[in-house]
Amino acid sequence: MCEESAFQGDQVLFLADGRLVGRLAEPTAAAVADTMTRLTEQVAGRRVSEGV
């Protein structure tokens, strides 16, 4: 994702495996990056626990 695109939208939606897992209103590049990192870690942890 291009971080600059976060400044062009009113909100950012985050999807994981086709499901809505997060939303940011009035996003900044830093907030988008932080949220992506946190969600990636959560999804990876879930996959490990499920044996995927």
Image (tube, grey):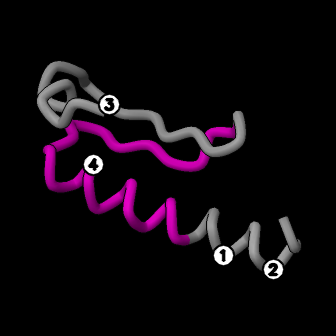
Q: Alpha-carbon distance for marks 4 and 3?
A: 10 Å
Q: Residue 32 carries which label?
A: 4
Q: Mark 2 points at which residue?
A: 49
Give, as a three-letter code, the residue at label 4: Val
Q: Name the residue under label 1.
A: 45
Q: In this view, does 25 lie above or below 46?
A: above
Q: Alpha-carbon distance for marks 3 and 1?
A: 26 Å
Q: What stretch is highlighted in magenta?
A: 19-41
Give, as a three-letter code, the residue at label 2: Ser
Kindly indicate whether the residue at mark 2 contacts the one at mark 1 (C-beta within 8 angstroms): yes
Give, as a three-letter code, the residue at label 1: Gly
Q: Is residue 38 left or right of residue 29?
A: right
Query: Which corner quadrant of the image does residue 16 belong to?
Result: top right
Q: Which residue lies furthest to the top in this view?
A: 8
Counting residues from the N terminus, which is met first, the one under dot 3 or under dot 2?
3
Q: Residue 27 carries which label?
A: none
Foreground tag (4 vs 2): 2
Give, as a three-letter code, the residue at label 3: Gln
Q: Name the residue under label 3.
A: 11
